[in-house]
Image: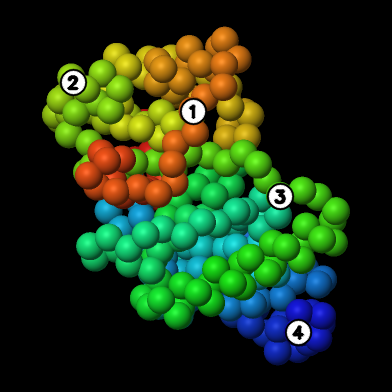
Amino acid sequence: MVDRLANSEANSKRIGIVEACFGTAGQPLAIPGRVLIGEGVLTKLCRKRPKARQFFLFNDILVYGNIVIQKKKYNKQHIIPLESVTIDTVEDEGDLRNGWLIKTPTKSFAVYAATATEKSEWMSHISKCVSDLLEKSGKSPTGEHAAVWVPDSEATVCMRCQKMKFTPVNRRHHCRKCGFVVCGPCSEKKFLLPSQSSKPVRVCEFCYKQLSTGATLPTRSDSYSRSEFTGNISDDDDDDDSSD
């Protein structure tokens, strides 16, 4: 299907419509061989709260943005190369159902579909696109991915020292290595994580010591429960203050 649509007029028109919806807020998306596989609204778990985002799946990239006017205008475009993507299902919990993780070396986050069928279709199509790309390139699947951030609402105290309570004065920060919500004193250090930034980024004291000594960091499970303190899963929100 992809090969058949690659140079079709219908595919070119569909991609043109997406470009027009982003306007100057987005990058050109039409390149030879690129096919728009599907699109839809997914709930993205952001740092402060879940938010609706418009997603577009192409055969080589995943694009999403903020909804300004549904089917007419989007902004804050994000483009994720599918070669670097791995996905994992997320267990249903409360109002958050039909979700999965989208993980890459630079950014990882959870999204939720409206129905189980929609979730299955999204995951199936993404997996197929990724496997086709890797097969063509001869590359291996990405082994490392950025931590999924724990939402602010899931931590009333620092997740490292377990003592500092968060207030308007004692602000929440996020470790870029483990994704935990931590206090200022527990995250004063910075470390260069090349897959995430060209500059050193904030990390917690625990991760800094492990990274500095070259020790193997324990892998945080991607299956979360509110009762485990690492609750919901999010990333640095697209439109919230994500400097910390």
- Which residue matches tag 4? 1
Question: Foreground: 76 or 187?
Answer: 187
Local SS, label 4: loop
Position in image of residue 203 (x %, y %): 44, 23
Establish if 28 lies above or below 231.
below
- Which residue matches tag 1? 218
Question: Foreground: 157 or 64?
Answer: 157
Q: CA distance from mark 2 to mark 3?
A: 39 Å
Point out the tag, 4 or 1, that comes first from the N-terminus: 4
Point out the tag, 4 or 2, that comes first from the N-terminus: 4
Position in image of residue 58 (x %, y %): 66, 70
Amino acid, disc 3: Pro
Q: Which mark is residue 141?
A: 3
Position in image of residue 128 (x %, y %): 68, 69
Q: CA distance from mark 2 to mark 1?
A: 23 Å
Q: Is residue 1 left or right of residue 22?
A: right
Establish if 149 lies above or below 41.
above
Point out the tag, 3 or 4, that comes first from the N-terminus: 4
Q: CA distance from mark 3 to mark 1?
A: 21 Å
Q: Is residue 58 left or right of residue 176?
A: right
Q: Alpha-carbon neighbours of circle 4 within 10 Å: few (<14), some, or many (≥20)?
A: few
Local SS, label 3: loop
Point out the tag, 2 or 3, that comes first from the N-terminus: 3
Q: Alpha-carbon neighbours of circle 2 within 10 Å: few (<14), some, or many (≥20)?
A: some
Q: Alpha-carbon neighbours of circle 1 within 10 Å: few (<14), some, or many (≥20)?
A: few
Which residue appears at 75% of the width and 84% of the height?
1
Q: Which mark is residue 164?
A: 2
Q: Nearer the viewer, mark 4 or mark 1?
A: 1
Point out the tag, 3 or 1, that comes first from the N-terminus: 3
Amino acid, disc 1: Pro
Which residue appears at 48% of the width and 12% of the height?
209
